[in-house]
Image (spheres, rainbow, N blue to C red):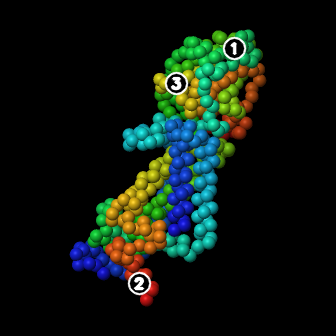
Amino acid sequence: MMRAMEPPPEHPTPTPRSRIPLGRAAFLGTVAAGVGGIALLSRFGGGVGSSLASLGDNLGVAAIVPTGGWRIYNVQDPMPTFDPATYSLTIDGNVENPVTLTWSDVQATEMVTEVSDFHCVTGWSVYDVRFRGIKAQTILDLVKPRTEAQHVNFQSLEEPYFDQLTMKQFKLPNVMLATEMDGKPLTRPHGAPMRLVIPQMYGYKGVKWLSKITFENEPTLGYWETRGYDADAWVGKDVSH
Amino acid sequence: MLAHLVVAITFFAMLWTGACLYSPALAEVMNRPSAKYWHLVSAIALGVGLLAIIILRPRAIGQVVREVDTFDENDRLWLRGGTKRLFDHTGAPEQGWLNAGQKLFTSVTSGLMVVLTITGLLLWLGEQNTTYRFAGTVDVHDLATLLIIVLTCGHLYLSLISPATRAATRGIVTGSVDREWAKQNHARWVRDMEQRNK
């Protein structure tokens, strides 16, 4: 059997007797680890995704698939394309001074930079995101909503995506219409040129590719809310109902 | 083997569409709705494909499953050799049709495929019904993907590049391998075959 030149096997046992079902043990062990992992991470998790992302970045995965911890969600193919020449943001509804801002009008509006965390309802988060944009109060001062208008609708260029906040929620700290993220203009996947940021709520409330804001007297359900998601998407609260 | 081809094609289809879902840099190359559609189509194709092969060739698949499942004394000694066994089979205990490393790889990747199916199903269900939404599902889906990528890189290295083992690839493509190579690397299998053919 063996050629003379080869060293003898360490322990040749041509007719092994004991047979161990190690294959199914490895298979079932892997499945069990996965299912246990879902339970454990759901309970004590948080940050595993972001540490995984930073591990990936350190291993050079970032060069192939850079993420920065973000996932991109959109509901219609293809994503809206931002054209500075034709873009406009209309703000109307039950307000004293409805406006339509061109892209240069938007850029000329007072902006601030604020750092906040971003949480997605599917379980991933990005921490310490530096957003620059227009504060809610600046918009309110500009269009002057009437007192009965207690609901704010946000329409995306990505039809039919749309969501809404109450006036009280719109006035929360760190809420803004962001045009920059981490020092750079918003990219197309992140909702260029402008998206709503409301760190207190899950990301599906933060309408991307923002095209229209309407102040209404009555609430309307948003895109995901007509599909069973909670209208008040407070981070950390059980979103089932 | 047909099953291997089905797994390989759908694996790379899911890897590509999954990367488009995962990375903002690729999100524009393939948008979420189409990436998600083809990701799911590939997963269903894998499931249906494997099921069809199991129904059509139950004996052949059963044989493979038994081979993968059962480790004998030689397999244990083979594993005790550690990672050097992956690259050098000289002096290793005689191995059957699959060596212990190949068996372990098959078991673990199959387990990971089940984990990916479960988490993928939960992600899909969670999007339409909040009852199925768990915070850890995405992380487990990602971790399992990372593991299966690492294992598949090793698998591809050993089957295409490593001189000690790449001769086996001929077996995957044409169905036969060099007898001398088989005698050195899968001696027990050769002996079993020779005895059966007597």
Across and down, in percent, residue A239 comes to 64, 37
Name which residue lies at 60% across and 63% down: B49
Viewer-nearest residue: A12 or A186: A186
Q: For residue A137, which quarter of the picture?
A: top right
Q: For residue B134, which quarter of the picture?
A: top right
Distance CA(mark 2)–CA(mark 3): 70 Å
User: Which residue carries the number 2 mark?
Assistant: B194
Above or below, B58 against A186 in this view is: below
Across and down, in percent, residue B44 comes to 62, 56
User: Which residue carries the number 3 mark?
Assistant: A185
Above or below, A24 against A108 in this view is: below
Question: Which quarter shows the C terminus of chain B?
Answer: bottom left
Query: The disc labelled 2 sits on which kind of residue?
Result: Glu
Query: The disc labelled 1 sits on which kind of residue?
Result: Val
Name which residue lies at 51% across and 37% down: B25
User: Which residue carries the number 1 mark?
Assistant: A99
Query: The disc labelled 3 sits on which kind of residue?
Result: Pro
To which chain does the residue with label 2 belong?
Answer: B
Above or below, A53 against A131 in this view is: below
Q: Is residue B87 left or right of residue A174?
A: left
Above or below, A53 against B149 in this view is: above
To which chain does the residue with label 3 belong?
Answer: A
Distance CA(mark 3)–CA(mark 1): 23 Å
For mark 2, give the secondary structure: helix
Residues behind callouts 3 and 1 on a single chain: yes
Viewer-nearest residue: A34 or A181: A181
Across and down, in percent, residue B135 comes to 56, 42
